[in-house]
Amino acid sequence: MSGPEIFSVSGCVSRPGLYELPMGTTLRELIYEHCGGIKNGRSLKAVIPGGLSTPILPADKIDCPMDFVSMPAYDSLLGSGGVMVFDDTIDMVKVCHRAMAFYDHESCGKCTPCREGTNWLMQVTGRILRGGERGDIELLLDIASNMAGKTFCPLGDSAAMVMKAFIRHFREDFQRKVQ
């Protein structure tokens, strides 16, 4: 794909803002050349490349071209181009919990998988933040799997996809929290 895309970059970068760049610009180029790198010389931990409805990527996957065709090969999506950057001080379980709280709030309640699933994802990630219980990580994956493909609109699918990506890339962060 060609043409311009507007990326809205927020989070732990030196120069957050709106950047109009050619479609296909890599996340690495966006973060390190246009946004001045990670704030205060910290290390990059993760990036949500296309808004909260797109799966998170770990730092080692930022060489992906930001376009609608390439992003799925990196297990994410371009989405709205709302790029959220996280450094090594950020608690990924907290970020995930906030994302699940967003999904729970935004669910219209029409379909059971989304209405119940988003609430359970929020509740269980909150429990993990407080120490969790044995089996909570597997429970989150089970809830997400039971939501995926079973909702009227994409909100439930997005919540499930995002939850699975957080665990796929940051399972150790979740495991450290569970007592």
Image (cartoon, rainbow, N blue to C red):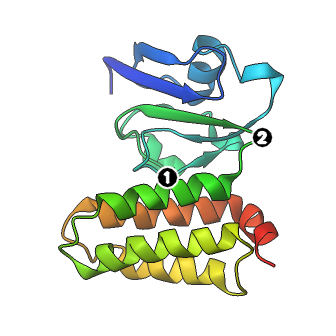
Badge count: 2
Q: Which residue is mark 1?
A: 55
Could you give the CA–CA distance between mark 2 and mark 1, rounded to whole angstroms?
Answer: 18 Å
Give residue 52's position: percent from left, percent from top.
Answer: 44, 47
Q: Is residue 110 left or right of residue 1?
A: left
Image quadrant where residue 18 sits: top left
Secondary structure of residue under mark 1: loop
The amino acid type found where label 1 is placed reads: Pro
Q: Give the camera-side residue of 141 and 75.
A: 141
Image side of residue 16 versus residue 91, left or right: left
The 10 Å Cα crowd at callout 2, few under 14, some 14 to 19, many 20 or more, is some
- Disc on res. 134: none
Q: Amino acid at mark 2?
A: Asp
For residue 90, above or below residue 125: above
Tag of residue 88:
2
Q: Position of residue 45 (x, y in %)?
A: 72, 41
For the point 59% across and 68% down, which residue is it? Answer: 126
